Image (cartoon, grey):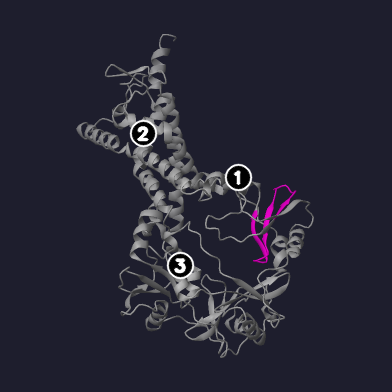
């Protein structure tokens, strides 16, 4: 029995999954061959995404081109319009559509639009009507606007605006090859793209997010693909790091053409080995943090806030029966003392409803936000926001709620939980921040002594809680945003240092992936020829080869 044991062990270890060395090398090799093109695309598109995102439509750009608010023809209060339409009115925006005042119920996502003059529900916009909307949106365009068809299924640039389907697409045929998408549902422009935005959108987010239309239309399939490809990529990286360290000799014990070498590989695989030792860890952390962006398997899931916490600032659901038409007109007149409002939105603060409006930029100033997707990290100014009490609309408008009220909301949000500290932040901290600098300051940060270590940030300019986090979400912030965007405080705000670091690491990761292309092609070609030459031989027999420690024993 003992005499047969070495032979048995040898036969068993010849099976790849029973030999850890073969397991590592085969796992890394074939996963790398399968995913090298995907990784190359991720690295190069990641650099593009530092300076370009998906084409879209900034709310400031849209507001600058909106019609001036005119309630002269309005005859119905918001509550009367909501009753006729059979909708809830706790999310309400007042604006204009085709020269008529309208109430938009349900927020900005597929709202129910009711005309304030006769109570009719907006039934949709024809192509003839939509061209007038497009014309108003491009007032400086002197050439005819060409109708480019109806969009009933999302194309590459409307995947994130499906709630506004169907749409009318118009081509301006200008120097930028601009296309405008007008929603039949809302009657407004929802997407605008130019040739330059589409070009960089393809090279950046479309490639990086694998946002190709046929796959992205099926949201569940796209989600599964990204999760599993990222997870498999992590396994590949770990296997490569372990094997790369195992095969690296700091004392140059290998011999290549009679020359001492620290690696057993030559040619492209030598460069791949060294690139993996240098950039393998960042490749792994970027792949893992990209996986976390999909929130897979309920990882780092935070407990939801309680109803008491959500209602601490608002005082409950908005009661639109308190919003009279006369009060709405008075609120508009009050706001006109500061600026001409184009839209009003209702919000509630501690049980009292308020009308709020943003100072719309001029059409010329709105152009500053036209290519926001091409300047994702450029600082942009914030629009002035003012409030008027819906119950006392003749009183003066204001821009922020009392600071003391923020402390009261903090106590009401978690009434039975001790507060560890409450600090007014005049600069961003590691969790409340924005690369553009557009998030409001100062804010009140309140930290609670509860089991989840809850933190909330209250903004007097918004009248409530603007961010909530617990210990698990703060950990996720570092594992996702920290590792993926390198938005560490010591680096994130130091440009162009941050740019240089991210680009250098991306080039290294791309080199790590590119060095596998030729070896992968040669290996696939060789395997294909072997299988074609010996059709009766099993794949397992073809792949059987001894694994040793010498430079010539394992070919990568």
Q: Which residue is mark 3?
A: 368
Q: Residue at x 65, y 66 (%)?
A: 461
Give the side of residue 525 with respect to residue 163, left or right.
Answer: left
Gap in angstroms between the C-alphas marked 2 and 3? 49 Å
Q: Residue at x 49, y 42 (%)?
A: 288
Q: Earlier in the sequence, mark 2 or mark 3?
A: 2
Quadrant location of residue 69? bottom right
Gap in angstroms between the C-alphas marked 1 and 3? 36 Å
Q: Earlier in the sequence, mark 2 or mark 1?
A: 2
Which is in the foreground here, disc 2 or disc 3? Answer: 3
The reply to whether callout 2 and callout 3 are in contact (CB within 8 Å) is no
SS at badge 3: helix
Q: Dot 3, crowdedness within 10 Å: few (<14), some or many (≥20)? A: some
Q: Position of residue 232 (x, y in %)?
A: 44, 41
Is 453 placed above or below 73 here?
above
Q: Quadrant of the C terminus?
A: top left
Q: Which residue is mark 1?
A: 475
Quadrant location of residue 165? bottom left
Q: Position of residue 55 (x, y in %)?
A: 41, 63
The reply to whether callout 2 and callout 1 are in contact (CB within 8 Å) is no
Magenta span covers which residues? 445-468
Is 214 placed above or below 363 here?
above
Gap in angstroms between the C-alphas marked 2 and 1? 33 Å
Q: Position of residue 346 (x, y in %)?
A: 63, 75
Q: Quadrant of the N terminus?
A: top left
Q: Residue 447 has which mark? A: none
Q: Earlier in the sequence, mark 1 or mark 3?
A: 3
The reply to whether callout 1 and callout 3 are in contact (CB within 8 Å) is no
Can the viewer see residue 296 in this picture?
no
Q: Which residue is mark 2?
A: 29
SS at badge 2: helix
């Amino acid at each position: 029995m003992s005499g047969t044991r070495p032979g048995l062990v040898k036969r068993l270890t010849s099976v790849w999954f029973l030999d850890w060395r073969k397991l590592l090398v085969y796992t890394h090799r074939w996963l790398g061959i399968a995913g090298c093109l995907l990784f190359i695309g991720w690295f190069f598109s990641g650099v593009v995404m530092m300076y370009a995102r998906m084409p879209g439509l900034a709310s400031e750009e849209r507001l600058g081109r909106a019609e001036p608010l005119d309630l002269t023809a309005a005859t119905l209060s918001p509550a009367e319009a909501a009753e006729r339409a059979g909708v809830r009115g706790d999310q309400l925006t007042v604006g204009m559509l085709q020269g008529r005042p309208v109430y938009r119920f349900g927020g900005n996502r597929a709202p129910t639009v009711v005309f304030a003059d006769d109570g009719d529900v907006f039934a949709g916009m024809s192509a003839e009507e939509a061209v007038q909307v497009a014309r108003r949106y491009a007032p400086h365009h002197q050439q005819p606007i060409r109708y480019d068809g109806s969009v009933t299924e999302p194309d590459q640039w409307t995947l994130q605006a499906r709630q506004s389907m169907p749409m009318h697409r118009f081509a301006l045929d200008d120097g930028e090859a601009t296309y405008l998408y007008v929603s039949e549902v809302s009657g407004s422009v929802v997407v605008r793209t130019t040739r330059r935005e589409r070009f960089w959108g393809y090279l950046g987010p479309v490639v990086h997010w694998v946002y190709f239309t046929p796959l992205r239309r099926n949201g569940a399939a796209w989600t599964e693909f990204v999760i599993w490809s990222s997870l498999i990529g992590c396994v590949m990286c770990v296997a490569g790091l372990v094997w790369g360290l195992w095969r690296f000799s700091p004392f140059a014990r290998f011999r290549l053409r009679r020359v001492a070498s620290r690696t057993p590989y030559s040619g492209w695989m030598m460069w791949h080995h060294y690139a993996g030792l240098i950039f393998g860890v960042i490749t792994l952390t970027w792949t893992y943090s990209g996986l976390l962006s999909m929130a897979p398997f309920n990882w780092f899931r935070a407990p939801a806030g309680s109803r008491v916490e959500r209602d601490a600032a608002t005082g409950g659901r908005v009661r639109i029966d308190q919003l009279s038409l006369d009060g709405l007109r008075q609120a508009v007149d009050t706001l006109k003392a500061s600026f001409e409002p184009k839209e009003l939105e209702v919000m509630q603060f501690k049980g009292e409803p308020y009308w709020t409006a943003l100072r719309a930029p001029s059409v010329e100033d709105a152009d500053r936000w036209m290519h926001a997707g091409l300047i994702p990290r450029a600082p942009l100014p914030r629009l002035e926001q003012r409030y008027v009490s819906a119950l006392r609309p003749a009183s003066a408008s204001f821009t922020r709620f009392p600071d003391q009220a923020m402390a009261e909301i903090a106590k009401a949000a978690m009434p039975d939980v001790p507060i560890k500290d409450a600090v007014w932040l005049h600069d961003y901290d590691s969790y409340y921040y924005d690369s553009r600098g557009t998030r409001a300051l100062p804010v009140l940060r309140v930290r609670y002594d509860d089991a989840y270590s809850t933190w909330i940030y209250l903004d007097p300019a918004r009248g409530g809680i603007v961010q909530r986090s617990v210990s698990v979400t703060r950990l996720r912030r570092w594992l996702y945003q920290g590792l993926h965007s390198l938005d560490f405080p010591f680096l994130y705000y130091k440009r162009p240092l941050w740019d240089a670091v991210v680009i250098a690491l991306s080039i290294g990761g791309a080199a790590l992936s590119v060095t596998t292309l030729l070896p992968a092609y040669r290996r696939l070609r060789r395997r294909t020829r072997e299988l074609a030459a010996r059709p009766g031989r099993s794949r397992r027999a073809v792949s059987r080869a001894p694994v040793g420690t010498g430079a010539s024993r394992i070919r990568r």
